Every structure is written in structure tokens, then in C-alpha cells.
Image (cartoon, rainbow, N blue to C red):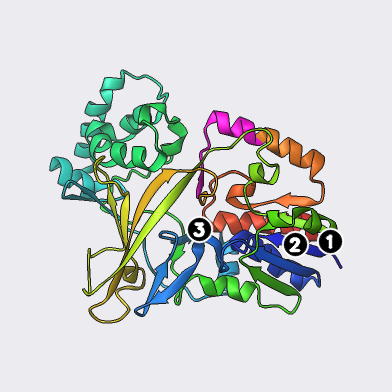
Amino acid sequence: MTKYLIVGAGLFGATFAYEAAKKGHEVKVIERRNHIAGNIFTKEVDGIQVHQYGAHIFHTSNKKVWDYVNQFATFNRYTNSPVANYHGEIYNLPFNMNTFNKLWGVVTPEEAQNKINEQKSILNGKKPENLEEQAISLVGTDIYEKLIKGYTEKQWGHSTKDLPAFIIRRLPVRFTYDNNYFNDDYQGIPVGGYTQIVEKMLASDLISVETGVDFFDRKDEYLKKFDKVIFTGMIDEYFEYSLGELEYRSLKFETEELDVDNYQGNAVVNYTDEKTPYTRIIEHKHFEFGKGDKNKTVITREYPKNWSRGDEPYYPVNNTQNNTLYKKYKELADKEATNVLFGGRLGQYRYYDMDQVISAALNVVKVELGI
């Protein structure tokens, strides 16, 4: 039996804990926040499951992962169909024939493609070198100016001319009248919220959980006491920023309970102009098709912000400079932290969707536990 300490009670740590306990290992989970489930934490307000840290829609084409997560919750058939608000003009996302028709009055895919080709000709066949050029090459100048530029610069805190092209290389553009943002085979929201998933994963006599505990307050003690540590926090923080700080984006959430039954008519509305300080408003009841108390709703405005020490890091900024620094930290981890496995968005410094988090955790499980 191996004694594992898991730092972070999010989806990565919980998946590893669940599998380790099934194999008879003793697991202790500590979490800096005062609750489990990390960024997928949900709680009920007015009969509505509120996503405390932004919208989370589970989607995947990996049947193994879909079957795996369905052990812990029943999923509804929610389909992610956000809309964009540009100075009061409403457009469908992802960019599709409904978007093109509203913007240009075109009706057929050929007309839409011709309009995009006409607008992207300003690049003169140049290979895109930044996000602005990449966006124009995909959807032309009108959509870039109205629906990409302002939103993206708020999200990342940089000019689109200074952001790498790969950030939107897989931008969904469809020449069909289809408002489904994801092309994945499986998609939905757990009925009753996400927190239950992690609760069930951690419900074992071999797993103990402590919240409101900071690993760094007793780091040396923990490393001596446990055989292995699964660390899902920031890898640069683990090494006391000895090689320099990696860059992250943080978020601020403003949540309100309102005495109306339906505030905006959609779960997610993106605000794509540069002047509106928030990037989107989430109306949580629409994730479960309007369920909740009558004449009550809960909305959350989401404000991106620069990260500094003490803030919650939500997104790694995977440009060349940061990825190069992360590789140095990874080399340091391989050399000095031989009993520590780094996982999740922060530990592996990469953007993961929820299905990718589970898949990555199961890959570590396979290597570490032989499952």
C-alpha cells in the first residue's frame, strides 16, 4: 500500500484518488479553498445549480471518458449555443450561416464563403503570424472586428496583434445553420450540478479530505510523511518561482440573484465589444432548461484580469516564452521532485477541458498504478 497525498480536490486529483483507493491505497486530499471540486464547484441557489467559477459544459468525443464520468452523475442533453452581443446586436455562435445571414444578408454557403474570401484578400495570401491575421484568414474582417477582437483582447489582456495565431487555429466556422458550439459526440450538464461528481469520487473509507488547508504551510512535513504527492497547483509556485513566474490569466466573478424568471434568454451571452468590461454573462438556470424557483434567477458577470500572486490562476498563457519556461520547470521537477507527480491545468501548464483533465488523470493512473 502506498500513502498518497493529493494537493487539490479538483477533477484531476479526485480522479486519481478514486482509482488509487479502488486499488487499496491510502489517500489524503488537501484543498486550499473551503470546498471540494475546484473550478467545477456548483451549489444550489433558488433551486438553481450555480457554476461558481464560470460556465462548465461537459463535452467529449472520447466514449471511454464519457462512460467514466457517467458513473457519478446523470447528464441532461444541454447543447452549448452561446450568443454574442455587440453593442446590442445579437449574433449566433459559433460562426455559422445564422451569423453570416444576420451580418451580411447572405443565404447560401457559397455566398458566405465568397464574402469571407473577399474580406480576407487583404492578407494577400500571407501566412498568419498573429491572432488578428489568423482570425481574418478564417472569417474575414467584419466578424473579426465585431465578434473576435474586443472579446479576445479582454480575455487575454493583450492586443490580438501580439497574441499567437494558434490560440484560434481551431476556431469553429460552419457553413450550416447549426448553433451547436461543439462538434463532440457527447455533451451535457450533470443534473444536480458538478460537485456531486467529486463527492462520489472521494467517498471512500481509504480517502480523507481536508479543505481550507494550504500545502505550502507544511510542505516539508508533507513530503516526508507521504510516499507520493500528486500536486495539481502551480508548478512554478511549488519551486518558489525559482526560475521566474509563469503567466496566468485570472477572473473576477460578480453573481446576482434577481427577482425575474428569465433575464437574458440564454445560458451564455458573450459581450464582444471592447468597452463592456466583462466578457460574458451566465444565466445559470438555462443550463437546466429554466428549472428553479419561479420569478428567480441567478446571473454571473465574468471579468478577466491579469494574475498576480494571491489571485486564483485560471488559464495558463501558452505563448512561446511561457512554454519555454515551463519546460525548464518540468526538467527541474524530473530532477528534484522524484516523488511528486504534477497534474492538471496548473501542474502541467496547459489548457484542459474537463474530459481532457479526466483523460490526463487516467493516464497518470495507468503509469503509476498499473490500471
Please name the residue shown 33% across and 71% down the image.
Answer: 285
Q: Are marks 3 and 1 in contact (CB under 8 Å)?
A: no
Q: CA distance from mark 2 to mark 3?
A: 29 Å
Is 359 in front, or is 53?
53
Q: In the rendered structure, which segment of residues is drawn in magenta?
A: 314-326
In x, y percent, where is residue 136?
A: 31, 30
Closer to the camera: disc 2 or disc 3?
A: 2
Q: CA distance from mark 3 to mark 1?
A: 38 Å
Q: Is residue 315 magenta?
A: yes
Q: Contact (CB < 8 A) between labels 2 and 1?
A: yes
Specify the farthest residue to the left: 105
**Amino acid type, residue under disc 1 in the picture:** Lys
Q: Position of residue 35 (x, y in %)?
A: 56, 69
Query: The residue under label 3 is which amino acid type?
Result: Thr
In-image side of 92 versus 366 (left or right): left
Residue 106 against residue 229 in the figure, above or below: above
Give the residue type at disc 2. Answer: Leu
In the rendered structure, find residue 225 and report the number of the disc placed on it.
1
User: Residue 5 — which label?
Assistant: 2
Position of residue 251 in the picture relative to residue 228 (left or right): left
Quadrant where the C terminus lies?
bottom right
Tag shown at residue 60: 3
